[in-house]
Image (cartoon, coloured by chain):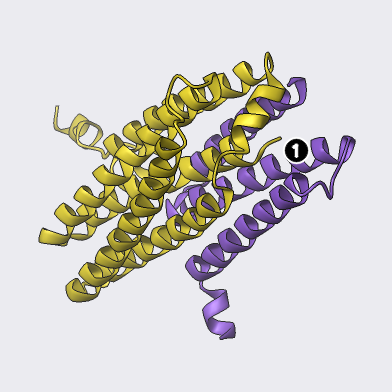
Amino acid sequence: MTAALRDPLISAWLWLLALSGASTLLAAAVSQGWLTGLGVTLGGAAILALAWAKARVILARYLGLAEAPFWHRGFSITLAIYALLLLGLYLIG
Amino acid sequence: MSEHLPELIAPEPPSVLDELPGDLMMWVLIVSELLVFGAGLAAFLGARIFDPEGFAAAQDALHRTGAGINTLVLVTSGFFAALGVRMAEAGRKAATRGWLAAASALGVVFLIVKFVEYADKARHGIGIETHPFYTFYYLLTGFHAAHVVAGIVILGLVSIRCVPRTVEVGAAFWHMVDLVWVLLFPVIYLLR
């Protein structure tokens, strides 16, 4: 079990499941009215942050960029800028 | 003359392009697809600025649980495709085909859930022109579903020869489809 968790592919998959579950829980909290006012906005920002984290895992582990530091850095920076753009548009709305 | 020969035949220094996993043309395709979907999602959030209440009301008609299940289905499918690449690199063709078939099967599950979702919208009279939210919804999720169909075909094709390089290229396309969904799902279905 521990050896399996040390496998980068398996740990990436488990991270993706956990991050997806966290996104869905946050969305449920918002739609059920458990979060109100500023909480809704912060919940939305957290959902975007989780999406950004999931995208990073897919790029690094599924697409193998963890083995290519130059490209990993480039894609990470571009993705971070794009996530900030989405966050900005979300906060304006 | 001969003393200059070693310089002429000296190997080129390694390029950063050599570091890129898989095929360069697949990465060109991945980046171009990400730009298209990225622009679409940014446009969606841009349009939402002018009608946040209307977008929130329209979003309430979406089936978030189904889309959440589809996220788990697709990231698991990506995991299976990555295992397929690993098996291909180990020269285990039968195992490669098995994992790629499992990845494709989950792709079909994704499409079935999507079809049920679209059928439910149609039953409630919700179409592409019902509200700008649904224009983006149908265009972005429909275009993504088309990529899932293409991905299933590509995984099937690369399974035939089962060469590590082609399997890696096919799996990379599948991961791109996965990557787009993890960005599309929260923006369209979850953000309030």
Q: Choose between B156 and B56: the one closer to the eye.
A: B56
**Quadrant the N terminus of chain B occupies:** top left
Give coordinates of residue A22: x percent, y percent. 69, 57
Quadrant placement of the C terminus of chain B: top right
Report the residue that reaches farthest toward the top.
Answer: B50
**Amino acid at dot 1:** Ala
Q: Position of residue B13 (x, y in %)?
A: 35, 38
Q: Is residue B20 in sight in this rendering?
A: no
Q: Indicate left or right for B149 with B36 as reference.
A: left
Chain under numbered label 1: A
Query: Which residue: 56% across, 23% down?
Result: B44
Q: How many marks?
A: 1
**Residue drawn at (77%, 51%) of the image:** A29
Instruction: Label the purple chain with its letter.
Output: A
The residue pinned by badge 1 equals A45
Residue nearer the viewer, B77 or B119: B119
The answer to whether B131 appears left or right of B174 in the picture is right
Residue A39 quadrant: top right
Residue B8 x/y as whole percent: 21, 31
The front one of B101 and B176 is: B101
Q: What residue is at 62 percent from the left and 17 percent from the top?
A: B46
Give SS at disc 1: helix
Which chain identifier belongs to the yellow chain? B
